[in-house]
Amino acid sequence: MSDRSTKSGTPIETRQLLHTSRPIFEQGAPGRTGASLPPCDVPAVDEKVALGALARDAAPGLPEVSEVEVTRHFTRLSRWNYAIDIGLYPLGSCTMKYNPKVNEKVARMPGFAGLHPAQAESTLEGALELMWRLERCLCELGGFQRVTLQPAAGAQGELAGVMMIRAYHADRGQRRTKVLIPDSAHGTNPASCTLNGFEVVSLKTGSDGLLHADVVREAIAANPNDVAAIMITNPSTLGLFEEHLGEIADVVHEAGGLVYMDGANFNALLGKVRPGEAGVDVMHINLHKTFTTPHGGGGPGSGVVGVGARLEPFLPTPTVEKAPGPGDKYRLEYHRPKSIGRMRSWFGNFGMFVRAYTYIREMGGPGLTQATEMAVLNANYVRARLAEVYSLAYDKPSMHEVVFTDKKLKKETGVQTLDVAKRLMDFGYHPPTIYFPLPAVTGGAGALMIEPTETETPETLDAFCDAMTAISVEAHQDPAIAHAAPLNTAMRRLDETHAARHPKLRWSRD
Amino acid sequence: MRYIPHTEDDVQRMLRVVGKPTVASLFQHIPERLRATRPLDIPPLDEGSLLSHLGEIGARSRPAIGATPRDGAALAFLVAGVTPHTIPSAVDALLMRAEWYTSYTPYQPEISQGTLQAVFELQTIVSELFGLAVANASMYDGASATAEAVLMARRVTGRRRALLSGALHPQYADTVATYLAGEPDAEGRIDPDAILPVGADGRLSPQTLEARLSNDVACVVVQSPNFFGVIADLKPRAELAHARGALLVVANTEPVAYGVMKSPGALGADIAVGEGLGLAIPPTCGGPGVGLFATKSDYLRQLPGRLVGETVDKEGRRGYVLTLATREQHIRREKATSNICTNQGLIALAFTIHLCLLGRRGLTEMARLNLSKAEYAKQQLGALQGFSIPFSGPTFNEIAVRVRGGDATRPALRLAEKGIYAGVAATQPGFYTDEKWKDLLIVAVTERHSKQDIDRLARALDEVCP
């Protein structure tokens, strides 16, 4: 079976008139504008008079183009992008699931989009209620006592979580300096710890792909009374469920430390595991992964953070509270003496809260649980179909994603991960995450980390697996094709070394 | 469930391929003690009910900005880092293209040239606005961009302390304090005296700054126009900072001002940061916004965040890639310049599109309109009996007004009930706690406001202040 939008057993056909669009600064004509401004109905003020020496001599070098030119430019550029609405986007650890259209409609309602954050609280009732309701939903999903919505993305959520951990120890009169992080972790984990003044102790993943409690015990013994926390991603970036999490949490807690769980892969756990009930003290959730807020070509995200009772006093300010008494009244609480403070301006990426809440309420508990089940089924299906073609990194059961390496293919054909990724584009797909996670790429191997998500049909998965198989077969017959790929894309491989050696980071006339 | 395509037949067929008897058996390896003890308690809603439910919640707020200028929304002069402007319809129409909003970070350049070229154009626009050579692909917001600028200044100078102007947006100052708490000094303190008082002209005075500068200061952070709307004279402040080996960081929450105001780069700033929300999308209760970040080319290697650079493909065609990633967390891990990963791509795109639409001429015209209307408002409000304009420094489109009666919070609340959001009281929750600002109301006047709107505001304030 194949993706029914194309002919059975063939690559997705990609034929289209595709316009280039030169940098907008090379278009237009002097004096042209796409602005629509009202006439001045008050006395005109000359900036040279009002601002004196602080007035600008010449206007900034912005483009000079009409609205039509701007519209064509950004429409043409958009067509050079791959997108979920075009096809499968199997980036591991990124959870590129479908972004429901109703979310976009709701987020644009004036009752949400038109709110100014400095409005009096009494005129923001609905916004406070939405934040309070979203927090309750996330507590229900994660088994947490409270959730702060403030962090703008996963990495800022990590930062907030680690700050709360530091504040917790400081509050108990302790200054602990180490955080334990498995070598499979996303790079933001160690970076967030360093930003917080912590030193990272790297833990080695076992040969079965899991983190073992003995490794944690040893690290704690080597750093007595100095381990502030462990940061553990579950499922790990290898797509495996950390089966020893319970024991690891016990070991860390006994040593006076806390357990941070990176919730980037929460899509594998909805309705199955409530981390807050499973020994996790703090966890961030990426609303732009599990809860369908669009990734926007690189954000905005939202990295909300759930905490248990121990860390509740340290949450960033302000929090949204429901007032006691009759009626649904909500208010902002700024007075939290032990708070770590503010992570950013205002309340967080509110527009993402509206979308995530809309999605959660449409799905409901049963729908979210089903999403997790089908996400795991889809990943395991891809695993089963490709297990003979590529090398499985680990044979433990997969959750929502599966990691292959190029060991066998590279040995037999010289074709490696990057080539496979680029060749996949010729077959009409965005490649998976490559050369990550680190434990899978030891010994010169390349890793392919595939996360299909639950929103993909089995036909799409079949067509994708057919393509992956065809690439392997082709590599055995004529490896030069994969080395040269992509061949059918609008651009061929780009010279990244040149870009780094001779940085040109803005347009200029030369 | 419309987002999950699997039929019962699909599931059975897939399970056979996987070699598992049931869906439940896919989760069998999760140890009992880690499993959820009960099913999720969240009722699902169909689209009709969903729209009703969210519509009801939305209706419990009264927006400052309507879908059209006069549709029951309030008459709003709110500011404090988010100055709403008229966003051309073309901006949202283009954002709604799925190729923009449903794509990921452009890790695969051959099929992400749209995003990459748009970011390259954003970097150019931000570089032009700030008058600095390099700009990144965006930060979360103006506040976190300011905090990252302070961390960057620490890396560049190898020093620890940051001095913040007392007229820096209080939420920005709070965010800087939160970020710096990670590295306390030997006594565990984080600069309790870092915030410098504001002089009679509403700005940090060179004298105050000179007295507080020392050889352990990494940077001085000044906002312009500042929280009270006053435009800072950056040059003498930059010279003072540089004389002591410190960097000048300039924050800006109203990029429209650059249509008439000199750029921070032209006046000696080393790092400039900003917030572009008001020009990108409707205010959306303060987020998502877009943090802007630029610096001199000397400090390129210390820049946080993503960068797009120009290059060529195999056939020599001009193209764009993410570059200089060796600064970033996914390569450098604990040694990265920042932990930032996902930023504010789509809002940065909206900002880019709007700036392209305005263009050189439109930005200047818009800035002149804002300046003229705000000057008119300044005269009208300053002339009210018992009102005054407390700061003598030049302003752009935000004005601090001292209101009659000694308290700005109460009249603002009373007017809010009548559908006029008169401005931001400096001591309303979330801002200053200093009692000396208690009667300060900060008002933004833009191209959205007519002369009549301004006159109405003046009358309303006059009526409501005791």
Image (spheres, grey):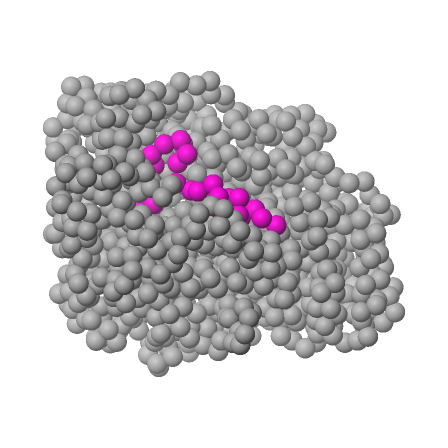
Residue B360 picture location, percent across and down: 68, 36
Q: Quadrant of residue B166?
A: bottom right
Name the residue at 19% across, 71% down: A251
Residue A382 picture location, percent across and down: 21, 37
Figure quadrant of the N terminus of chain A: top left
Q: Quadrant of residue B455?
A: bottom right
Figure quadrant of the C terminus of chain A: top right
Q: Quick check: B140 above or below A476? A: below
Q: Quadrant of residue A313?
A: bottom left
Q: Nearer the viewer, residue A75 or B222?
A: A75
Image-based side of A290 in relation to B346, left or right: left
Name the residue at 12% across, 31% down: A411
Name the residue at 12% across, 41% down: B19
Residue B67 picture location, percent across and down: 65, 46
Residue A162 belongs to magenta span? no
Name the residue at 85% across, 48% down: A42
In this orientation, does residue B344 appear?
A: no
Q: Nearer the viewer, residue A294 or B227?
A: A294
Q: Main secondary structure of the magenta part?
A: loop
Residue A384 picture location, percent across and down: 16, 38
How many numbered marks are there? 0
The segment highlighted magenta reads A82-110
In this orientation, does residue A477 appear?
A: yes
